[in-house]
Amino acid sequence: MPDFLFDWIFRWTHTAATATCHGLDSRSIHIAGHALPYCARCTGLLWALLTTTVFLRLAKRTDAAKPPNIVQAVLCGLLWIPLAFDGASSYLGLRGTTNEIRFITGVCFSAMLPAYATLLRNYNPEAPGGKPLFRHTWEMLALLAANGLFYGLAAIPSVWMWGALSLTLCALMFAMWYSLFATLYTRALRWRGLWGARVLPAASASIWLFFLSFLPNFFSI
């Protein structure tokens, strides 16, 4: 990779990441000797969002409206516990942790968030039923395991791979906030059309992340 391109990607992605992540070098995953812009935990959070979103689209579940069964609902709740325990215990100095554990707990926490968002968008209490989010519980387990693909990519000792993943993670963070603002404008405020669904969400996400970049990161978990 040319030096000017490397410098641009490093400077831009690490600056963008400071809006939402402490980005400590020791707590970040390294590829070809270079740290990704987000810490291992945030990397897991973002990568799981991508994996689940791709699954919902490939499996044609973006219009799913049937809530998960009791076993699936309990599993979804249990997936939030590892991050809470690992983050709190390591932050308080009760135990040590590793970047691999941080990544896994991040994946567990956010893997089902796109599914929740899909259900929130489509569920109609007056017309129960419809297509389920997950037909079988094993789909959820396979989805969690699929996030291991990230470490397969991260194992490639290439600066180009570092650059591609760095840009992807920053794009995912923007997409997450964009989706939240789009839902706010189109669902809560009912602002339809190009402005409500595209322009305002993009502008709001950009301004919000720019504002966050000036706030200090108090927690390094």
Image (cartoon, rainbow, N blue to C red):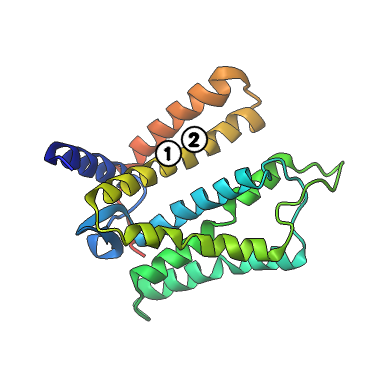
Q: Secondary structure at mark 2?
A: helix
Residue 143 position by quadrant: bottom right
> Residue 113: x percent and y percent?
58, 52
The residue where tag 2 is placed is 178
Q: Nearer the viewer, residue 203 or 166?
A: 166
User: Which residue does the image show at 82% across and 46% down from the upper left?
Assistant: 130
Which mark is on residue 174? 1
Residue depicted at 66% across the width and 25% down the height: 190
Q: Residue at x 53, y 34 (%)?
A: 181
Looking at the picture, tell me which residue is in the foreground, 118 or 2.
2
* Quarter of the C terminus within the rendering: bottom left
Q: Is residue 104 left or right of residue 167?
A: right
Placement of the N terminus among the 4 image quadrants: top left
Instruction: Give residue 152's position: percent from left, percent from top.
Output: 38, 61
Q: Quadrant of residue 118?
A: top right
Hey, what amino acid is under mark 1?
Phe
- Inspect the image, locate mark 2, and give the three-letter code of the amino acid beneath it: Tyr
Q: Are marks 1 and 2 in contact (CB under 8 Å)?
A: yes
Q: In the visual, does 34 lie left or right of 40?
A: left
158 vs 164: above or below: below
Tell me if residue 22 comes above or below residue 118 in the rendering: below
The front one of 122 and 213 is: 122
Closest to the observer, 141 or 17: 141
Numbered disc 1: secondary structure = helix
Residue 49, percent across and down? 51, 50
Q: CA distance from mark 1 to mark 2?
A: 6 Å
